[in-house]
Image: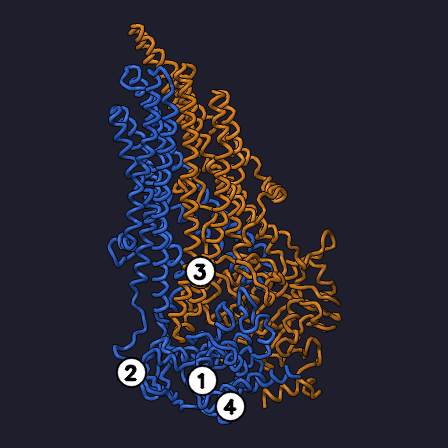
Chain colours: A blue, B orange
């Protein structure tokens, strides 16, 4: 792991220092509450001693109230320490998450295309949590331990140095044992995590491919495989349980053994009258009280490696420099007409051995309609992505004669109305989704007009909440065609000069499709339209059609021109027409 | 993550917390009416936590599920019981040493008897040795407390997981169409793991904690009833504080989880739609939305922090009150020489022992509750009865013939949804060795024929026979074993090419593989890969192109030497490059075998012995290519269009 900073955790800790006051107050409360705890032990111990010689036990009532007062004060400090420190850690968490999120939205599409979204999500979720745990509550526990352990031990040393020192032996054994077991613990815990995700992916695969599994009658074999994965997990879990058992045993065993010197050395000291019964009580009670802080320190040591790696991963993401950069002073065009010119455009995905687009040249006059067709994987979507500068193309792409690389991104993308292939919508209201591209919420008349253009009026009328209908997970589920048309309305809401549809009419029936295409052209007052399509009927009325095969433009022309020559276009057209015919019977 | 005073090391050692704040978990997998337009559903997460505090029938059923491991559970209780006794022994020895040898030695030295003093000094060794022995034995049992309990839980959940998965394998396709894959995965993973918490730190430890509390109270009374009364008087307050705060904590945690799920859901959504966000230049807007979600999440967290910040001090304050009262009452007794220091110490230590389980009570109760919710979801799956079932008892026919199959559809009707017929009285026959092709538009019912023939579903009327016997009378596995299936978007499993071809069918040997590769044209595709047959296939076969996947799928079908071949639009999504290869492979596949070919392209069906033209669930035309052309109906028109 190459961390950008040498101590990433320290780097992360700087974020805590932004909250100096609450942090300082919280940190101040830690020793106060610890000292209160020790004080209580001292008072009780002293009282026990005093009882031996005292004639009356009347002072006990006063002691009781005194104890309560100290306990109350200690409680207040404990409340404050947790409140301040953990709150700060949550604020830091939120700040960090926001910062990471902002970074992610800024990173180029190339970056996103290469990253697995699961991995990015885990940086924002578990990595941030790991760091927070270590630096927030972890800090609190450690501070508590740093105060509690030395002060307690110091106090005990003053009471009886020999006894205090002999108690250190079991504690040292414990520290050593923990050190020895920690590697084993980490190893098994990783193995468990891995085998659990193996189970998940086995199940995932089985459920996704259930048709094949059942079609081949492979259920028994699948069950056997799953059981095998499950048993492997069980094996690792048991191993992990054993390692945890050892840790647990060492910790508690050490604590138990501390009582042996207390009994023996303390007992002798009592016999020698160098130690009072109350002092012995102090030894016992403080042993209990330092026990948890010691465990907390062990726990901190346990999560340290993970927190460190997480902090490094966070830093790494924040330091990623993969933004599509604008030029220092990007150019702007006074009014975009919508003419696109592509000259010798090529593009190869990172890591791919073949280019996705090869030396493609085409001119799209403002106000014209360009159809792009071709078999799956021919490069249609890639081409669209290049136009929006989601990827950086080789060769030149110009908008109204200006290379898009020199153009301000806001203007370029502002001029584009983009309708994605997958019909991606947010789980928000219909109004918010359609108005996604505009600064202010859309008013009803505008929405009505957009629905009319995208041929959604009827469907929206059926929404129980009208324009404010929630869509997706928590609202209505839209059909593929409805999603696509909502995406079209969203693109139209920007009133873009260039409208790009990336095979975005596939789920719309052909009759609606032809009316939609007509709407898109007419409503735009000379808008340029780029139609990628699998179905050729989508593009038949385009001014010009580009046939892509393996990233190359193999044919260009109008529908009639393309039909006139043998090849992919003519064959596909015939096949699709036949299908069409069949379904319209 | 919850911050408990004793959280860091999870004192009892049982793994992580049950309530890992996970991402957006899949909502409960019931076929939900909740997606009806307009109905606002509550936070999915809210529904994941059962509102019932205790569910006896659920617990009874869970215990029934793990009865096979009764001795493990008994062993766990045994370990806890021994450990409890050992925990009691420590303070008892301490008291014995203080009140015995130490007091005697002091008395002896007061009386000026140095020999006797020395004797009692030495006697202390014995007591110390006893303490060492107890400490060592309890160390062993502490190990078992974690390791054995964990093992018990694992044994139990591994069984349940196996049962759950096996049951899922029996469920029909309709179930898988209905329930999202993600939520099924959640059932066999996190829901099952939740049960582990429940069996160990939930049921066993909670059960034993109650025993411990009762037992310790009894001992306290035995030691000193006046002091015990003081403690007993404070118990309701302690337990009350614990339960009240934990109740609040549960609600607060639930809100935190729900808001975190929303936050992560939004994050996921933005990442999957990042293209739209960037093209629309709405980065600022999604940032603001995210900030809003963060704000809600923070507010929920702050409430939790407040609760916990209050909880521990309040609980400890009550504990301090108990201790203070003990000192007060005990002190009077000590001053009156009624109570020895040793007994006081023993009492004090037992009170400490008592307080831990009381403190943990609320937490364990929460674990139990979240596990109940998981158990409910798991049982919901186990209670789902598959619609397609094998005939019970005798009379189930095991299909073993080697010859090509003979299939008959007799007036078969079917609908996925009541009132929406997909097939209406469809009859046809595939004589042994013949090829029947089905053409028709999307939604004409072509794939339904395949689904019925494989018995993914049962017809609503009519019957399908294979070699003269109703499909419903067959042993399902033996039926499907005879079928070679090639799907439109065929599915490859992660593993090797060889594994994908053989599919662990024991009758597919090297010879069959060779032959299949030869006839399927897949040999070149596979030879081009490093490792050949042992080349790795990634998840869903992503490293192969659609065409290559299709060739491998054909080889897979061939390798089983099926008696019936089903090709479901096998060339629909393949580009022209490999199309010819695939058609060639298909010819080899269907040769001398009974086959059913569902086709998009007419060119692939021309050679069929019979072609059915399906339209809106009905068979409108049938005959050979030539006959249909001569008929001048739909088929002829389609053919003209496609080959004009």
Q: Position of residue A548 (x, y in %)?
A: 44, 83
Quarter holding residue A499: bottom left
Quarter holding residue A356: bottom left
- Disc 1 chain ID: A
Q: Where is residue B580 in the image (x, y as percent from the top left)?
A: 52, 79
Q: Nearer the viewer, mark 4 or mark 2?
A: 2
> Mark 1 or 2 closer to N-term?
2
Q: Position of residue B388 (x, y in %)?
A: 67, 59
For mark 1, what is the residue? A530
Q: Residues within 10 Å of mark 4 (few under 14, many from 20)?
A: some
Residue A362 visible in image:
no
Q: Which of A370 and A281 is in front in this view?
A: A281
For mark 2, what is the residue? A331
Q: Nearer the viewer, mark 1 or mark 3?
A: 3
For mark 4, what is the residue? A541
Is B70 left, or right, of A487 in this rendering? right
Total count of labels: 4
Q: Nearer the viewer, mark 3 or mark 4?
A: 3
For mark 3, what is the residue? B263
Compared with A242, B501 (above or below) is below
Q: Nearer the viewer, residue A524 or B306?
A: B306
């Amino acid at each position: 792991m190459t961390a950008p900073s040498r101590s990433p955790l320290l780097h992360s800790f700087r974020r805590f220092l932004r909250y100096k006051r609450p942090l300082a107050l919280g940190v101040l409360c830690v020793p106060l509450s610890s000292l209160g705890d020790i004080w209580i032990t001292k008072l009780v111990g002293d009282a026990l001693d005093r009882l031996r010689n005292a004639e009356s036990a009347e002072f006990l009532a006063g002691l009781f109230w005194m104890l309560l007062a100290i306990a109350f004060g200690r409680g207040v400090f404990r409340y404050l320490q947790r409140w301040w420190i953990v709150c700060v850690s949550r604020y830091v968490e939120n700040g960090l998450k926001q910062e990471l999120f902002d970074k992610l939205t800024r990173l180029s599409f190339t970056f996103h295309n290469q990253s697995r979204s699961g991995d990015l999500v885990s940086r924002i979720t578990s990595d941030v949590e790991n760091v927070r745990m270590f630096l927030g509550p972890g800090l609190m526990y450690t501070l508590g331990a740093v105060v509690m352990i030395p002060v307690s031990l110091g106090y005990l040393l003053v009471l009886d140095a020999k006894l205090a020192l002999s108690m250190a032996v079991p504690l040292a054994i414990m520290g050593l044992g923990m050190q020895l077991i920690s590697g084993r613990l980490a190893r098994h815990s990783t193995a468990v995590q891995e085998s659990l995700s193996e189970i998940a992916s086995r199940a995932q695969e089985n459920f996704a491919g259930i048709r094949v599994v059942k079609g081949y009658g492979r259920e028994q074999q699948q069950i056997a495989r799953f059981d095998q994965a499950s048993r492997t997990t069980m094996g690792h879990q048991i191993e992990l349980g054993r390692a945890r058992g050892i840790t647990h045993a060492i910790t508690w065993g050490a604590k138990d053994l501390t009582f042996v010197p207390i009994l023996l050395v303390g007992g002798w000291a009592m016999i020698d009258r160098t130690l009072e019964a109350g002092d012995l009580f102090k030894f016992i009670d403080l042993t209990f009280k330092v026990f948890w802080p010691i465990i907390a320190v062990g726990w901190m040591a346990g999560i340290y490696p993970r927190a460190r790696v997480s902090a490094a991963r966070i830093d790494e993401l924040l330091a990623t420099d993969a933004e599509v950069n604008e030029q220092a002073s990007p150019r702007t065009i006074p009014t975009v007409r919508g003419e696109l010119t592509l000259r010798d455009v090529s593009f190869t995905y990172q890591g791919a051995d073949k280019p996705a687009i090869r030396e493609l040249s085409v001119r799209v006059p403002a106000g014209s309609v360009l159809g792009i067709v071709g078999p799956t994987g021919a490069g249609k979507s890639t081409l669209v992505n290049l136009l929006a500068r989601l990827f950086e193309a080789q060769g030149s792409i110009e908008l109204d004669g200006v290379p898009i690389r020199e153009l301000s991104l806001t203007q370029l993308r502002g001029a584009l109305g983009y309708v994605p292939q997958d019909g991606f919508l947010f789980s928000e209201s219909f109004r918010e989704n359609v108005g996604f591209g505009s600064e202010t919420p859309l008013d009803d008349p505008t929405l009505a007009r957009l629905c009319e253009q995208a041929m959604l009026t009827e469907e929206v009328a059926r929404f129980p909440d009208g324009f404010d209908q929630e869509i997706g997970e928590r609202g209505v589920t839209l059909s593929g065609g409805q999603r696509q048309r909502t995406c079209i309305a969203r693109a139209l809401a920007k009133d873009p000069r260039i409208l790009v549809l990336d095979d975005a009419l596939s789920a719309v029936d052909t009759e609606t499709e032809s009316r939609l295409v007509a709407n898109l052209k007419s409503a735009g007052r000379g808008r340029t339209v780029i139609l990628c399509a699998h179905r050729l009927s989508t593009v038949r009325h385009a001014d010009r059609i580009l046939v892509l095969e393996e990233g190359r433009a193999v044919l260009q022309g109008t529908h009639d021109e393309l039909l006139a020559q043998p090849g992919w276009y003519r064959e596909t057209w015939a096949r699709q027409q036949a299908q069409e015919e069949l379904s319209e019977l | 993550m919850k911050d408990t005073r004793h959280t860091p090391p999870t004192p009892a050692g049982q793994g992580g917390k049950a309530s890992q704040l996970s991402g957006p978990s899949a909502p409960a997998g019931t076929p939900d009416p909740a997606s009806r337009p307009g109905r606002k559903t509550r936070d999915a997460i809210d529904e994941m936590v059962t509102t019932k505090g205790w569910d006896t029938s659920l617990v009874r059923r869970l215990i029934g599920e793990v009865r096979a491991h009764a001795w493990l559970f008994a062993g766990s209780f045994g370990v806890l019981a021994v450990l409890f006794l050992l925990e009691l022994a420590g303070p008892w020895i301490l008291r014995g040493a203080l009140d015995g040898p130490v007091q005697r030695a002091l008395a002896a030295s007061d009386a000026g008897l140095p020999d006797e003093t020395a004797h009692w000094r030495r006697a202390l060794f014995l007591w110390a040795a006893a303490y060492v022995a107890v400490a060592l034995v309890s160390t062993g049992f502490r190990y078992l407390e974690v390791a054995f309990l964990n093992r018990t839980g694992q044994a139990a959940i591994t069984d349940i997981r196996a049962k759950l998965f096996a049951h899922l394998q029996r469920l029909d396709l309709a179930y898988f169409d209905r329930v999202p894959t993600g939520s099924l995965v959640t059932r066999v993973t996190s829901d099952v793991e939740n049960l582990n918490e429940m069996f160990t730190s939930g049921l066993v430890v909670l059960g034993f904690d109650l025993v411990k509390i009762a037992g310790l109270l009894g001992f306290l009374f035995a030691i000193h009833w006046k002091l015990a009364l003081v403690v007993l008087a404070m118990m309701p307050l302690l337990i009350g504080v614990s339960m009240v705060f934990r109740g609040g904590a549960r609600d607060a945690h639930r809100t935190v989880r729900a808001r975190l799920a929303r936050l992560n859901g939004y994050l996921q959504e933005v990442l999957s739609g990042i293209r739209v966000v960037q093209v629309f230049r709405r980065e600022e807007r999604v940032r603001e939305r995210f900030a809003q979600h963060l704000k809600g999440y923070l507010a929920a967290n702050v409430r939790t922090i407040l609760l916990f910040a209050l909880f521990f001090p309040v609980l400890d304050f009550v504990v301090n009150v108990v201790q203070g009262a003990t000192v007060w009452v005990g002190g009077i007794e000590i001053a009156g020489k009624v109570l020895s220091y040793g007994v006081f110490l023993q009492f004090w230590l037992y009170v400490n022992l008592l307080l831990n389980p009381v403190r943990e009570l609320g937490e364990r109760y929460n674990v139990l509750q979240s596990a109940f919710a998981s158990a409910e979801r798991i049982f919901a799956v186990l209670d789902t009865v598959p619609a397609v079932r094998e005939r019970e008892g005798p009379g189930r026919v095991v299909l073993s013939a080697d010859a090509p199959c003979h299939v008959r559809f007799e007036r078969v009707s079917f609908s996925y949804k009541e009132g929406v017929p997909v097939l209406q009285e469809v009859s046809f026959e595939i004589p042994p060795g013949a090829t029947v092709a089905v053409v028709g538009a999307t939604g004409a019912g072509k794939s339904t024929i395949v689904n019925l023939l494989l018995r993914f579903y049962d017809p609503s009327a009519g019957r399908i026979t294979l070699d003269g016997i109703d499909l419903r009378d067959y042993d399902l596995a033996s039926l499907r074993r005879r079928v070679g299936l090639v799907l439109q978007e065929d599915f490859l499993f992660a593993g090797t090419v060889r594994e994908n071809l053989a599919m662990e069918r024991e009758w597919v040997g090297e010879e069959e593989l060779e032959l299949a590769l030869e006839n399927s044209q897949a040999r070149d595709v596979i030879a081009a890969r490093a490792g050949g047959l042992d080349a790795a296939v990634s998840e869903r076969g992503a490293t192969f192109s659609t065409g290559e996947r299709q060739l491998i799928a054909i080889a897979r079908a061939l390798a089983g030497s099926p008696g019936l071949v089903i090709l479901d639009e096998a060339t629909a999504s393949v580009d022209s490059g490999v199309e010819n290869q695939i058609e060639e492979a298909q010819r080899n596949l269907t040769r001398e075998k009974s086959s059913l070919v569902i086709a998009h392209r007419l060119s692939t069906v021309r050679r069929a012995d019979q072609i059915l033209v399906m339209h809106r669930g009905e068979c409108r035309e049938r005959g050979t290519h030539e006959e249909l052309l001569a008929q001048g109906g739909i088929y002829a028109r389609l053919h003209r269009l496609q080959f004009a």
